[in-house]
Amino acid sequence: MLHIIQNDPEVPPGTIGEHLTVPYVVCHLYNGCQLPRLADISALIVLGGAMGANDEQSHPFLADLKKLISTIVGSGIPYLGICLGGQLLAAVLGAKVASKRWEERGNLDVSLTDEGGRDPLFSGICRKFGTFQWHHDSFDIPEEGILLASSPACPNQAFRVGESAWGLQFHPEVTERIIRDWCAWEHSTSVKTEEFVTAFSRAADAYRATARRLLQNFLQIS
């Protein structure tokens, strides 16, 4: 079965559930949910969170999650990491995850690399497409990884490792409710809430179409 790991109560699956056509289970890891057994996982999606990929001391569950991700990748089980989920994938493969580097907030375009244009996860997605970004941290590309997407503000937006593991820096799953919740985290963003929401609303249909195609592609791979 497809499993979704939610690391933070305010970083839910969002629109992902709308686009999935297979049964799935959400594990609320922040609330003490036990990680699924490897034998029960047909594919794994790991969501974002306000914590960092190296914050095991303050969020001990991250250590076990990293072990699971490493095993998933080694087993060839399809994996999709979103924001923190992508950073965790990079970290378990030995790549640097840096804080307060290449930070992004709001609606920003991302461009596929030549490899990204040929990658099955991005099949049918425009070479330049709109995304919603919300991150302090960013990942380096693992030594064995392939850069798939980039942006002027954050050159590492997506990568693949092997044939079935992807890390994304951007958020394809957001909704207006999620954006409002994230804006409330800091004063600097709370005063821009309506600005972020208005820009998102203008592009919401395109975001949903991109997210739908990306999830459909992932399911086909799975």
Image (cartoon, rainbow, N blue to C red):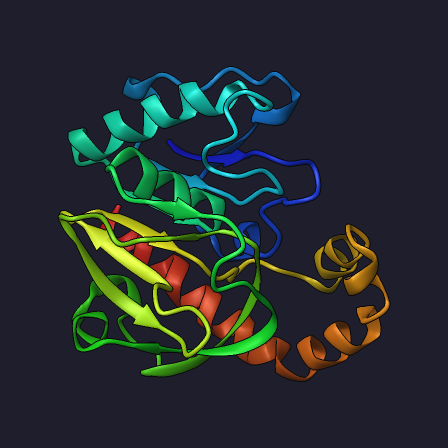
Position of residue 198 relative to residue 121, above or below, is: below
Please indicate whether residue 117 sits to the left or right of residue 51 in the image.
left
In the figure, 180 relative to 20: above or below? below
Residue 9: x and y in percent read 69, 36
In the rendered view, tell whether residue 58 sits above or below residue 51: above
Quarter residue 69 falls in: top left
Residue 10 placed where, x, y %? 70, 43
Q: Image quadrant of residue 90? A: top left
**Residue depicted at x 44% and y 58%:** 169
| Residue 12 percent across, percent down from the top left | 63, 44
Q: Is residue 22 visible?
A: no
Residue sitting at 83 percent across and 74 percent down?
A: 194
Dividing the picture into quadrants, the one containing residue 138 is bottom left
Return the residue nearer the eye: 75 or 54: 54
Residue 220, relative to residue 30: is it above or below?
A: below
On the image, the x and y values in percent for residue 11 come to 64, 45
Q: Is residue 202 left or right of residue 73?
A: right
Identify which residue is drawn at 28% across, 62% down: 121
55 sits to left or right of 124: right
Q: How many marks?
A: 0
Please state, as top left, top right, bottom left or bottom right, where the N terminus lies in the image.
Answer: top left
Residue sitting nearer the eye, 216 or 194: 194
Q: Quadrant of the C terminus?
A: top left
**Residue 62 seen in the current view:** yes
